[in-house]
Image (cartoon, coloured by chain):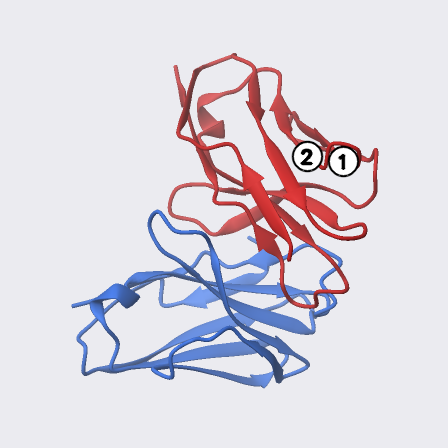
Chain colours: A blue, B red
């Protein structure tokens, strides 16, 4: 148990669906992150939030829309995705976004786009 | 920019064998260095870390020493177990590069009984 909880763990959706991934951290951290992990590719940073403000958007397509309503919760809203978006989506948190310390990861949401 | 290069896998070892996974990095200044481990079906979790040159991080029998002169942070374990089978990621972070940890590509380790 890392203190970062992601739901759902598995999601199958069609290309026209709209769904959301949820992340919650119980560590009192101020920074939260979305990463994408695809087979045979390096880990990709998607978004960084610090104190609920987006500080990094790593050239992610607009069909991925993040939301951070407070420092404990992070969402990734998904719409009109493509099959190549199928991947493991990992949420992480850290003490702050100066990132001098470790990242705490959730177990991931395995997304399959049909 | 920053980069991390780690040994390509997959690595297959017999139980009780010695493990080394090489990791070298490129960064300006003095980054913090990490090894993360990802067990099947799970997210990444911190295995060990070192924040300054010559520091040795250790956990669960794994060790890695921060070598500034060779820009390396190689992971070692003297006697691996089947339960060590996982993907291992070397990573660095810097306060000057806020929010952006740099990860290696990961090395898959399989330990056979």
What element does badge 2 sit on? loop
- List x then y, in percent, for residue B54: 83, 33
Label ID, residue A23: none
At 65% from the left edge and 25% from the top edge, which residue is drawn?
Answer: B61
At 73% from the left edge and 69% from the top edge, which residue is drawn?
Answer: A96
At 74% from the left edge and 32% from the top edge, which residue is drawn?
Answer: B70
Tell me whether marks 2 and 1 sit on the same chain: yes
Residues marked 2 and 1 touching at CB (< 8 Å): yes
| Rendered-image quadrant of the N terminus of chain B | bottom right
A7 lies left or right of A24: left
Occupied quadrant, residue A70 = bottom right
Q: Is residue A114 above or below residue B63?
A: below
Q: Is residue A69 above or below residue A28?
A: below
10 Å crowding of disc 2: few (<14), some (14-19), many (20+): many
What residue would you read off at disc 2? B73
What element does badge 1 sit on? loop
| Rendered-image quadrant of the C terminus of chain B | top left
Q: Is residue A97 above or below residue A100?
A: below
- List x then y, in percent, for residue A105: 54, 57
Label ID, residue B66: 1
At 51% from the left edge and 73% from the top edge, which residue is drawn?
Answer: A58
B82 lies left or right of B65: left
Instruction: Measure the alpha-carbon separation of dots 2 and 1.
Output: 5 Å
């Amino acid at each position: 148990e890392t203190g970062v909880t992601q739901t759902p763990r598995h999601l199958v959706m069609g290309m026209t669906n709209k769904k959301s991934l949820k992340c919650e951290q119980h560590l009192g951290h101020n920074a939260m992150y979305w990463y994408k992990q695809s087979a045979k590719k390096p880990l990709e940073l998607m978004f960084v939030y610090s104190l609920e403000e987006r500080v990094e958007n790593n050239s992610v397509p607009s069909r991925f829309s993040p939301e951070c309503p407070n420092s404990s919760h992070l969402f990734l809203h998904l719409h009109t995705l493509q099959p190549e978006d199928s991947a493991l989506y990992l949420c992480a948190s850290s003490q702050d976004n100066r990132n001098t310390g470790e990242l705490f990861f959730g177990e991931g949401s395995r997304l399959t786009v049909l | 920019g920053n980069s991390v290069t780690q040994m390509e896998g997959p690595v297959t070892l017999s139980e009780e064998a010695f493990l080394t996974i090489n990791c070298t990095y490129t960064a300006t200044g003095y980054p913090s260095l990490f090894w993360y481990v990802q067990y099947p079906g799970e997210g990444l979790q911190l295995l060990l870390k070192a924040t300054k040159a010559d520091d040795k991080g250790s956990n669960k029998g794994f060790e890695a020493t921060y070598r500034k002169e060779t820009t390396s942070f190689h992971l070692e374990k003297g006697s691996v177990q089947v339960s060590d089978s996982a993907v291992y990621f070397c990573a660095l972070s810097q306060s000057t590069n806020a929010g952006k940890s740099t990860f290696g590509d990961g090395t898959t380790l399989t330990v056979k009984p």
